Image (cartoon, helix red, strand yellow):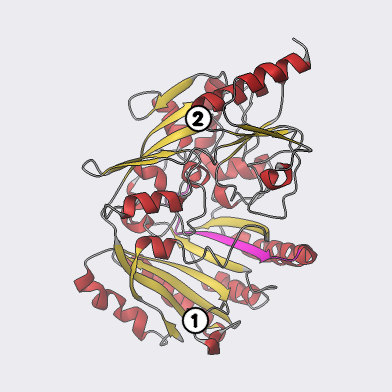
Amino acid sequence: MSDTQAMQSFQARLRGKLIQAGDPEYDAARKVYNAMIDRRPRMIVRCVDVADVIACVDFARTEGMLLAVRGGGHNGAGLGVCDGGLVIDLSGMRGVRVQSELRTARVGGGCTWGDVDHATHAYGLAAPSGIISTTGVGGLALGGGIGHLSRRYGLSIDNLLEVDVVLADGSVVIANEQKNADLFWAIRGGGGNFGVVTWFQFRLHPVKEIIGGPTFWPLEQAPEVMRWYRDFIRQAPRELNGWFAFLTVPPVPMFPEALHLKKMCGVVWCYCGDPAKAEQVFAPVKNFGPPALYGIHAIPFPALQGVFDGIYPPGHQWYWRADFVNELSDEAIALHCKHAALMPTPQSTMHLYPIDGAVHDVAPGATAFNYRSSGWASVIVGVDPDPANKAKITDWTKGYFDALHPYSAGGAYVNFMMDEGQERVQATYGENYRRLAEVKRKYDPGNLFRVNQNIRPAG
């Protein structure tokens, strides 16, 4: 079959929109969340159903094309787009069906977590996810899913019950604990290495209104705040989650004008327990320091999930580096404070997400997510809307990471990684890597799905 005939046959199989260079929508369609990524695929297909996904996978395989899969487009390394290849854009597949009596939700592969929160909140339910509602479900969940509800209800993958997957040969399978259990094990932390997940089924939990928000302290107090936080969060009830941050206070009405654009340290809290106990739970937080800002109040869970959406819109320059951390030693804290004082732009930041509570209840080998026994997932991000500041934010992030990496557990949360090479990928999966490579050989022996933090098929 000629190239022209192959293209005609491919187009005839599609119900979704095929976009190529020269089309009016092309430049908008190839953009991802991180504006530092500027790749030019040969074609983008905005899929509307599973049949479109199958057609794309078949075409990429038979034509030997590079294939990328895009959900929400948030991936820091821009792994939802590629140069010269085919992009499967799932953003048109955004259905959510809640079965409230079963406390489950069936979620389309193109959904954002905002889509899920909107649908589940009406029933007083929620699925554990991340901290920004515009993040894609697929990317976050397949990498693990760390967020506001992790200490109480575990990672997103700990609440994943089943997936529908289009495999490299174009077939569609269901994977759960009973069917294709090896694949189900692998996709829970192994990212998009094994196929295109077109549907997810999640377990939901009774979360409607939470009590939470930010507390800020002056940057000069950061060493003592970090030491206090390190000890406090470990013994805090599981219903309380709090992630630590270095930040510049955004100049927005929700924060006092006197704090605008000040470099500070803080914790963003989410308490999903008995409201009658909230005052007692938060008493140590309110009394420590005390905080320069104590922003704890009752808030609908989706509002907390969306609070950073406006601060971090699509189209900014991002450079990420990350590690898992077992301990926050005093020496590491001193280095954190040194580099935080040098934050180069108002949106640059560092976060520490606690990895304990319900996350520790699952054995490290039970899913592909390897660093369950660690204490925190750290991420350092240089962010700015101006491309002229690309080098400044990148250099700060790399310098900060290089200083703290010797105090890390060795690997990183895959959702926070840039393109850092195979050695780093293997360090992230640790003892699970060999098993993942075997599963990869079974389901994708030709490594069709390689635009990701790639797990190569076992040789």
Residue annotated with mark 1: 255
Q: Is residue 382 magenta?
A: yes
Q: Residue furthest bottom?
A: 258
Name the residue: 55% across, 47% down: 72
Residue annotated with mark 2: 49
CB within 8 Å, label 1 to label 2: no
**What crowding class fits label 2: few (fewer than 14 Cα within 10 Å), some (14-19), or many (20 or more)?**
some
Eyeballing the image, is 334 above or below 325? below
Q: Which mark is residue 21?
A: none
Identified by mark 1, the residue type is: Phe
In the rendered image, the quadrant that contains the N terminus is top right
Identified by mark 2, the residue type is: Asp
Bounds of the magenta span? 371-386
Residue 452: % across, % down: 62, 39
Which is more N-terminal, label 2 or label 1?
2
Quadrant position of residue 356: bottom left
Residue 62: % across, % down: 68, 17
Eyeballing the image, is 60 above or below 452? above
User: What SS does tag 2 mark?
Assistant: loop
Name the residue: 67% across, 41% down: 81
Name the residue: 59% across, 56% down: 322
Name the residue: 64% across, 76% down: 338
Q: Is residue 308 magenta?
A: no
Q: CA–CA distance between discs 1 and 2?
A: 43 Å
